Amino acid sequence: MTKFVAIVSSKGGTGKTTLAVNLGSALNHYGRDLILVDGNLRNPNVTIHLGLTTLPNTINDVMNKDGKVTDAVYRHHSGLKIIPASIAVHDLKGLDISKFKKAILKLKNVCEVVLIDTPPSITDEHFDLLEIADEIIIITHPELPSLTDTLRIIKLSEKAGHNIIGIVVNSIHNKKFEVHRENIEGLLGKPVIAEIPFDMVVKESIRHNTPVVKHQPNSKASKEIYKLASMLIGYVPKDD
Ligand SMILES: Nc1ncnc2c1ncn2[C@@H]1O[C@H](COP(=O)(O)OP(=O)(O)O)[C@@H](O)[C@H]1O
Ligand SMILES: [Mg+2]
């Protein structure tokens, strides 16, 4: 059975694409048959993070030309399988999310997990897209404005009947003014499933079009993402 998991936040810049690329890569590392889909059709950042902007087939071809979804699946040099989105401006015209949903649902029984990176807003289009997700992971920064927005997206997601796996807190600087884990869990009423430090190697890895979990597997950020991946699949690493 294929599980559809979406990475969500209430605004841009929280680290959705970074988490999608790296959690996807870490789950792939642990043997999950996974396809990462660039679901940010207006700003296809997964495609750009991984340097896949010149591939002949994208999710837009599957949506608009009723193409075979497997023709748009590529294996990145890191081993991660991804479906890119088109960076061409003309593909933005008449964007129809129902076509995206139809295209993605073609991945049912093609792989174990479909991981979807999502656009940065709380709009009807956004929730329409989330309809295909069996589970969602919400990512936030440890700051009050980000957390307040996150609470709104949790409420709206729950109202829409989505199953929230938990909260990933990203870009932690370990400063006194940051909101701590217990307070985040108290405020949001959801478990914090990962705390990813701010780490310059994340930015460096994007420059190399490579997930940081492959580029610097021993960096603090990578270790936390591997820990999250292993927790999600119930895998206990031997050296723990
Ligand atoms: N843990 C981190 N440490 C350092 N930089 C990060 C981290 N997570 C994300 N970033 C940076 O923050 C920016 C926004 O991340 P991105 O994943 O594109 O966010 P979103 O998809 O939510 O808009 C990028 O420049 C990325 O390199
Ligand atoms: Mg993004």
Image (tube, grey):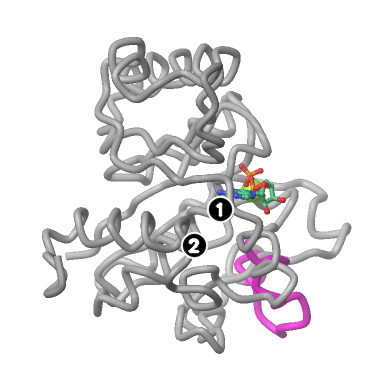
Local packing at callout 1 (Cα closer than 10 Å; few below 14, some 14-19, many 20+) is: some
Measuring 29% from the left and 74% from the top, which residue is drawn there?
A: 111
Quarter of the view holding residue 10: top right
Q: Hey, what amino acid is under mark 2?
A: Ala
Residue 36 drawn at (x, y percent) = 47, 66
Secondary structure category for the residue under label 2: helix
Residue indicated by mark 1: 99
Q: On the picture, is 97 further left or further right than 25?
A: right
Considering depth in this image, is 144 or 38 the residue closer to the camera? 144
Q: Is residue 201 visible?
A: yes
Residue indicated by mark 2: 103
Measuring 55% from the left and 13% from the top, which residue is drawn there?
A: 144
Considering depth in this image, is 24 or 82 the residue closer to the camera? 24
- Magenta stretch? 46-61
Residue 182 drawn at (x, y percent) = 29, 19
Considering depth in this image, is 106 or 23 the residue closer to the camera? 23
Q: Is residue 197 above or below residue 222?
A: above
Quarter of the view holding residue 66: bottom right
Local packing at callout 2 (Cα closer than 10 Å; few below 14, some 14-19, many 20+) is: many
Measuring 37% from the left and 54% from the top, which residue is drawn there?
A: 224
Specify whether residue 60 is painted magenta.
yes
Q: Are marks 1 and 2 in contact (CB under 8 Å)?
A: yes
Q: On the picture, is 218 further left or further right than 141?
A: left
Q: Is residue 46 above or below residue 164?
A: below
Q: On the picture, is 41 further left or further right than 67?
A: right
Specify whether residue 76 is painted magenta.
no
Q: Which mark is residue 21?
A: none
Q: Quadrant of the N terminus?
A: bottom left
Q: Is residue 29 above or below residue 44?
A: below
Q: Hey, what amino acid is under mark 1?
A: Lys
